[in-house]
Amino acid sequence: MVLHEFERLLDDSGFQITSKQLDSMLGPDLRNLDVPKASVYVVDAQAAKQATGALLGNILDRFNGARLLVVGDNLKESDSFALLRQGAKGIMTYAEAREQLPRALPQVANGGIWVSRPVLSRFVDSILGTSAGRRLRVDAANDLSRREQEVLTGLLENLANKEVADRLHISERTVKFHVSNLLAKFGVRRRADLILLCYQRRGMAD
């Protein structure tokens, strides 16, 4: 997909679009590229993965918590995992972008996640299987109740709803209620999205 295709897809998105054609695909040049501040960045990952990583690193260094949506083809699962570790909030193929990009853009801009369910699930499993993942914690949002913080802790330990309920001596239905509230407060759709968001906020390495 070329630059004008991105522009065409996003023409009616309601976002002000600023396009930038890169003159160099060399890592050092991309690390030092002057990038404007934006509510969300759509990055074409046609370059070598090292170059894409350098560009994402540059954006995140300049704008902590920048929202990145990466579009590319022939991304291996390991490539997607690396992008998620680095802080990407969205990943899609060029074919998916033609249909999904206009819907994904506001989702990512508002702090949500747009990653295919299989890739996201396997990535979260890979996080939770590490010692770092088992110690995963997050600075909870200020408006979380004590019970919501306790439920979130259980989710980040990869406990099932019943296991959280048994630990907190509450019903499984009550746990489901708190999980729904947590998803709404963090602006994500699934518990895997929530775990990824917490992982990225902590900046942990696998």
Image (cartoon, helix red, strand yellow):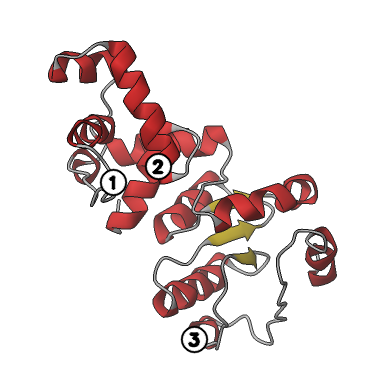
Q: Which of the two labelled residues, at mark 2 and mark 1, occupies the earlier sequence position?
A: 1
* Among numbered discs 3 and 1, the one appearing first in the sequence: 3
Q: Which mark is residue 185?
A: 2
Q: Secondary structure at mark 2?
A: helix
35 lies above or below 147: below
The reply to whether the C-beta atoms of the residues labelled 2 and 1 are less than 8 Å apart is yes
User: Residue 110: percent from the left, percent from the top?
Assistant: 53, 54
Query: Is 109 placed left or right of 82 in the picture?
Result: right
Residue type pointed to by label 3: Pro
Which mark's residue is nearer the viewer, 3 or 1? 1
Question: What is the C-alpha distance between the residues marked 3 and 1?
Answer: 41 Å
Q: Amino acid at mark 1?
A: Asp
Q: Quadrant of residue 130?
A: top left
**Looking at the image, which residue is at 54% across and 32% down?**
118
- Indicate the position of residue 170 as horizontal and vertical percent values: 19, 14
Near mark 1 (Cα within 10 A), the count class, few <14, some 14-19 or many ≥20, is few
Tag 2–tag 3 contact (CB < 8 Å): no
How far across and how far down the image is residue 53, in percent?
49, 68
- The residue at which mark 3 appears reads as 28
- Image quadrant occupied by the N terminus: bottom right
Q: Which numbered marker is on residue 143?
A: 1
Q: Is residue 17 above or below residue 148?
A: below
Q: Residues within 10 Å of mark 3 (few under 14, many from 20)?
A: few
